Amino acid sequence: MSAHGDSKDGYDFAHPIPVPMLLAVFGALVVLTIITVAQASFDIGSLDIVVVMVIATIKAALVMAFFMHMAYDKPFNVIVFLSSFAFVALFLIFTMSDSSQTSPDFEPVIEEAATEMASPAVEAPAASE
């Protein structure tokens, strides 16, 4: 019978993380979520998306490092996982720059279409009696 520390059968024993550390990470995630919700009530202009993405990146890094045990995993797995974040960041950067080139804001302009529908260009002739 092999012990848990022995990896002859190809399986490594997961790195145990103390419960107080997991609770501290959970507390940090809750605090960052509260900060994200509170930030929604402030208007800081074009920095809104930057602040939200920085907070989300910190939260994702905490989840990745401690709950997914990447802090104690092989370096190759960490590199592959972080490269996926880099590609998502590139995708978001290209999408945001393209959308800022095509429209000044992200809200559609519905007023013009509503006024065109309310006043038709050609009216039907009145019926004569």
Image (cartoon, helix red, strand yellow):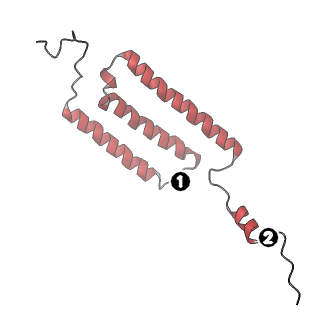
Please name the residue shown 48% across and 43% down the image.
52
Asked where in the image residue 129 lies, by quadrant, the reply is bottom right
**Left or right of 43: which side holds 7?**
left
Task: Return the residue at label 1.
Answer: 43
Q: Position of residue 53 (x, y in %)?
A: 49, 40
Q: Position of residue 89 (x, y in %)?
A: 53, 32
Please name the residue shown 22% across and 11% down the image.
9
Q: Is residue 54 above or below residue 105?
A: above
Judging depth in this view, the residue of 88 and 122 nearest the camera is: 122
Amino acid type at circle 1 is: Asp
**Left or right of 101: which side holds 29?**
left
Q: Is residue 113 above or below residue 3?
A: below
**Can you tell which of label 1 and label 2 is closer to the viewer?**
2
Q: Position of residue 93 (x, y in %)?
A: 59, 35
Task: Return the residue at label 2.
Answer: 120
Judging depth in this view, the residue of 28 and 81 nearest the camera is: 81
Q: Is residue 61 above or below residue 14?
A: below
**Distance of mark 1 from mark 2, alpha carbons?**
39 Å
Judging depth in this view, the residue of 84 and 10 nearest the camera is: 10
Please name the residue shown 32% across and 40% down the image.
28
Q: Earlier in the sequence, mark 1 or mark 2?
A: 1
Judging depth in this view, the residue of 122 and 93 nearest the camera is: 122
Q: Is residue 37 above or below residue 11?
A: below
